[in-house]
Amino acid sequence: MEGERDAPPPSGEANDTDALPFPGSLCHRCAAPPQYIRTARSTFIRCPILKKYPPQPVLRCEAFVPANLTPPESYDGEGGPP
């Protein structure tokens, strides 16, 4: 295959060839799941929010939302106050 689109390996199962590219990049910790495009010699990370391949490693991003961020219990799902 010329390029593969896939998610990073689950933690604990990574080996040297499957390790995350640019481990310091914010993309790996973003709530918007990035797409990993792997070729024989390169790996590209596509942002579904920005709809582009930002230069890596991404250290600052105005669209970044932490993946572990959960809404407060009083959140009504409508975007307004409860």
Image (cartoon, grey):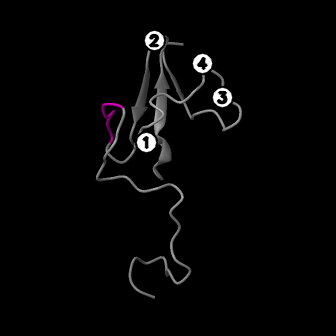
- Locate the N terminus and report the quarter of the image it occupies: top right
Q: Residue at x 31, y 36 (%)?
A: 52
Q: To which residue does mark 4 refer?
A: 17
- The dot on residue 43 is none
Mark in the foreground, 2 or 3: 3
Is residue 64 inside the magenta stretch?
no
- Amino acid type for the residue under numbered disc 1: Cys
Mark 2 neighbour density, 10 Å: few (under 14) some (14–19) many (20 or more): few
| Segment colored magenta | 51-56
Determine the CA span between mark 4 and mark 2: 11 Å
Q: Residue at x 40, y 76 (%)?
A: 79
Q: Secondary structure at mark 2?
A: loop
Q: Secondary structure at mark 4?
A: loop
CB under 8 Å between callouts 1 and 2?
no
Residue nearer the viewer, 80 or 23:
23
Q: To which residue does mark 3 refer?
A: 14
- The dot on residue 41 is 2
Mark 1 neighbour density, 10 Å: few (under 14) some (14–19) many (20 or more): many
Q: Earlier in the sequence, mark 1 or mark 4?
A: 4
x and y percentages locating residue 59 in the rendered image: 34, 42
Q: Earlier in the sequence, mark 1 or mark 3?
A: 3
- The dot on residue 27 is 1
- Amino acid type for the residue under numbered disc 3: Ala
